[in-house]
Amino acid sequence: MISTIAVEKSVIVVDDEHDLVNLFTDALSSYGYDVSAFTDPIAALEYIKKNPDKYSLLITDFSMNNMNGCELGNKVKGLNNNIQVILITAYENIDGNILNFERLKKPVTLQILLEKVNNYLKK
């Protein structure tokens, strides 16, 4: 069984841009979060299927190959309804599915991202 403390600080980052994944991972890790990162949403989903209760927060880009962030968020919520989802997007208007998720508009500063993560995970 995973301890509550570990889950409260566990984040999964999914973005098809390697540089952003590395930047977000480094920033979140430096604040003490346990971060797993993926550049392929399908690989991320397969990993989450094996560990559905490990994470309390999913941070994902909207526009990715193979699966968009909204689809990923909905599939992850189907595995663990308690996981929170932050969707990062440059788009102003996206279909109604996005209303279920927190949305951050690109470009996202690390300060804003960390504030949102802290709000969700109550450091």
Image (cartoon, grey):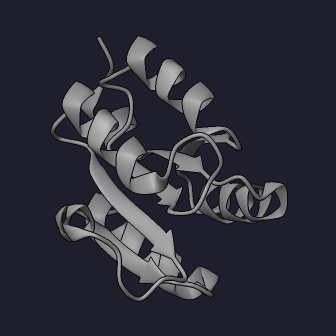
Split into 4 quadrants, where in the image is the C terminus? Answer: bottom left
Q: Residue at x 38, y 36 (%)?
A: 55
Q: Residue at x 51, y 19 (%)?
A: 46
Give how far across and how far down residue 111 sits, in percent.
56, 86
Does 116 appear above or below 117?
A: below
Give how far across and how far down residue 64 sits, in percent.
62, 54
Q: Determine if residue 122 is in view.
A: no
Give how far across and how far down residue 38 sits, in percent.
66, 40
Split into 4 quadrants, where in the image is the N terminus? Answer: top left
28 vs 92, left or right, is right
Does 19 appear above or below 93?
A: above
Q: Determine if residue 83 is in view.
A: yes
Give how far across and how far down residue 70 sits, in percent.
37, 55
Camera-side residue: 100 or 58? Answer: 100
Does 40 appear above or below 79?
A: below
Q: Residue at x 65, y 42 (%)?
A: 37
109 vs 87, left or right, is right
Q: Residue at x 33, y 22 (%)?
A: 52
Image quadrant in which you'd find residue 10: top left
